[in-house]
Image (cartoon, grey):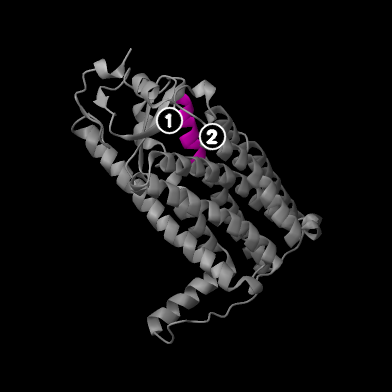
């Protein structure tokens, strides 16, 4: 059937053809998403700047792992802000309508940015495994195994699965007329003039591999979280500790708990899409909520680092005092070098 035979009630817009509450909800959630990613991008860039400026004074291995995580956070925010997409689902078909600055170049460019966004999400969850693995090793005799070269090797190794997904998404080919015909089964809007890309069939696309790579890493992540907590509890019962060490372990417990919850925000997005694909949830959940929940990660991740990791907290306080007092336009912040005990605090 030719899609030109359809009667379109209206041209496609960001909020869709619904009126009233649904339009307000769509605008509100996208505003929240843009604000979260904008603030998150600024915080991640600030933390990256502090790490680069003071790399020699920090624990190098941990700084490399944290930098790897922050780069993925920045990529997630930048690609979302450049694409600003409306996601629509019709049975096994998924389409993205782009409204962001990427449309000034081309739809293909928007499609590549969307692929990079998925690539960064997969790298992010793998980076959390590296971080919790590092903290677990620091509490055991395995800390002697950690080195800068091995850390870089593990980062590159974690980057490879996301690279495979990136290549699969970028090289995926779809027929625009066929895609329009498929989504017109569920929508009566005119998408003919939209910057649109998508996947004609969920089962013949890279999406199953992407979902697999976003879901499965949660298993080793939470297994390592369990090992970390078990090791910490064992040390607390076995050793007689000073008040300083005990305070460090108390802070560590709080920080590890907060960090353990972060992947759940991304997991919520994956489950929303998965259940919508199985038609257990209405497709409006994808339109309105996909990407909004996980955007919280981009703020929480750097905030936890800057508030709970002692060297970064000292740097923030130092910058703040120098800015307030206006002693220098380019302040030099003094802080103690990060020790192994301090590193475990993140």
Name which quarter of the figure residue 246 lies in.
bottom right
User: Residue 179, percent across and down?
Assistant: 39, 24
Q: Nearer the viewer, residue 336 or 83?
A: 83
Residue that extends furthest to the bottom in the rendered view of this protein:
327
Residue that extends furthest to the top in the rendered view of this protein:
1
**Is residue 236 visible to us here?**
no
Where is 321 relative to 191, above or below? below
Q: Which residue is mark 1?
A: 198
User: Residue 229, percent across and down?
Assistant: 67, 48
Residue at x 68%, y 66% (from the top left corner) = 60
Residue at x 25%, y 35% (from the top left corner) = 13
Quadrant in the picture for the C terminus: bottom right
The answer to whether 67 appears left or right of 201 in the picture is right
User: Tag 1 or tag 2, which sits nearer the N-term?
Assistant: 2
Where is 205 relative to 235, above or below? above
Residue at x 34%, y 46% (from the top left corner) = 100
Q: Nearer the viewer, residue 35 or 91?
A: 91
User: Residue 269, percent across and down?
Assistant: 46, 36
Q: Which residue is mark 2?
A: 171
Residue 3 lies in the magenta stretch: no
The answer to whether 117 appears left or right of 229 in the picture is left
Where is 61 relative to 14, above or below? below
Q: Nearer the viewer, residue 173 or 52?
A: 173
Residue 271 lies in the magenta stretch: yes
Callout 1 crowding tier (Cα within 10 Å): few <14, some 14–19, many ≥20: many
Q: Which region is colored magenta?
A: 266-275
Residues tagged 2 and 1 counted as in contact (Cβ below 8 A):
no
Name which quarter of the figure residue 335 lies in.
bottom right
**Secondary element type, mark 2:** helix
User: Residue 237, percent across and down?
Assistant: 74, 54
């Amino acid at each position: 059937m030719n899609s030109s035979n359809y009667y379109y009630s209206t041209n496609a817009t960001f909020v869709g053809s619904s009126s009233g509450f649904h339009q307000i909800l769509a605008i509100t959630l996208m505003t929240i998403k843009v604000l979260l990613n904008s603030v998150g991008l600024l915080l991640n860039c600030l933390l990256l700047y502090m790490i680069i400026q003071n790399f020699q004074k920090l624990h190098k291995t941990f700084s490399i792992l944290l930098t790897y995580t922050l780069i993925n956070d920045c990529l997630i925010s930048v690609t979302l802000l450049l694409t600003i997409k409306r996601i629509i689902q019709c049975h096994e078909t998924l389409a993205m309508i782009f409204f962001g600055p990427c449309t000034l170049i081309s739809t293909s460019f928007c499609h590549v940015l969307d692929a990079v966004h998925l690539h960064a999400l997969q790298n992010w969850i793998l980076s959390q495994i590296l971080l919790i693995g590092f903290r677990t090793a620091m509490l055991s005799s395995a800390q002697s195994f950690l080195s800068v070269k091995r850390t870089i090797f593990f980062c590159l190794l974690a980057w490879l699965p996301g690279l495979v997904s990136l290549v699969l998404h970028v090289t995926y080919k779809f027929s625009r007329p066929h895609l329009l015909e498929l989504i017109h089964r569920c929508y009566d809007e005119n998408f003919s003039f939209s910057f649109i890309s998508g996947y004609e069939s969920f089962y013949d696309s890279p999406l199953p591999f992407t979902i697999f790579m976003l879901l499965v890493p949660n298993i080793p992540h939470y297994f390592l979280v369990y090992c970390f907590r078990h090791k910490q509890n064992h040390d607390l019962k076995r050793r007689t500790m000073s008040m300083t060490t005990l305070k460090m372990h108390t802070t560590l417990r709080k920080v590890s708990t907060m960090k353990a919850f972060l992947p759940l925000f991304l997991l919520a997005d994956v489950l929303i899409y998965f259940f919508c694909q199985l038609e257990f949830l209405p497709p409006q959940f994808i339109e309105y909520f996909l990407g909004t929940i996980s955007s919280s990660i981009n703020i929480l991740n750097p905030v936890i680092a800057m508030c709970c990791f002692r060297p970064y907290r000292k740097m923030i306080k130092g910058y703040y005092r120098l800015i307030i007092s206006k002693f220098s336009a380019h302040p030099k912040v003094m802080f103690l070098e990060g020790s192994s005990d301090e590193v475990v605090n993140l």
